[in-house]
Image (cartoon, rainbow, N blue to C red):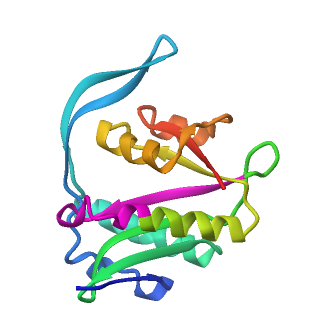
Amino acid sequence: MAEEYRVLSAEEINRGLFSAFIRRQEVNLCWRKIDGRWQIKPAPFVDDWSEEDYAFLVACLQNTVRTGGVVMGVFLDGLLKGFVSVESAPFGSEKQYLDLTSIHVSQDMRGRGMGRELFRRAADWAREKGAGKLYISAHSAVESQAFYKAMGCVEAKEINAAHAEKEPFDCQLEFSL
């Protein structure tokens, strides 16, 4: 079973693309910034997507492609098992950031290196577009943060206020290209 990584067109991004994708993530511990210090706290919940969430995701990913960004997927036996998206509009005080807006690997494929490869490809794409850094508003789950730390991400030097307000528990990260 060889994995196929490729860029997706807006036309192929639809609900059916996600038919074999399992979003489910059981979260027990999350990072929280309390009094200026990061601490691990219990915050148990199951993260999964509803049909409404999938509809929103499809619209967002289609918009990413239509506005010059990129969506890349990894397929196994023709089925989507992971994806990453990067927006095209630079931001930051020196326009140094491109926004990595999503990176997800299907629950049945986690731990096989697909996320690392998707992240690497997203970073390569952003570098080719002239960005100095990727910006990531990242889920605060301990497992998610361990992934980003292993990839070399650090706390963002400049905080994107829109991201921080929309997802106050996310960790605002950056990755130097």
Q: Is residue 115 magenta?
A: yes
1 is higher (above) or lower (below) than 104: below
**Residue at x 53% of width, y 44% of height:** 153
Q: Position of residue 173 (x, y in %)?
A: 55, 41
Which quarter shows the N terminus? Answer: bottom left
Where residue 156 sits, quadrant-wise, is: top right
Q: Nearer the viewer, residue 2 or 142?
A: 2
Q: Position of residue 78 (x, y in %)?
A: 27, 89
**Residue at x 20% of width, y 61% of height:** 107
Which quarter shows the C terminus? Answer: bottom right
Q: Nearer the viewer, residue 134 or 18?
A: 134
Q: Position of residue 53 (x, y in %)?
A: 31, 60
Where residue 154 sits, quadrant-wise, is: top right
List the single residue furthest toward the top: 35
**Residue at x 71% of width, y 71% of height:** 128
Where residue 86 sits, quadrant-wise, is: bottom right
42 is higher (above) or lower (below) than 114: above
**Residue at x 35% of width, y 67% of height:** 114
112 is higher (above) or lower (below) than 35: below
Image check: 128 left or right of 169?
right
Q: Is residue 11 magenta?
A: no
Magenta residue span: 97-116
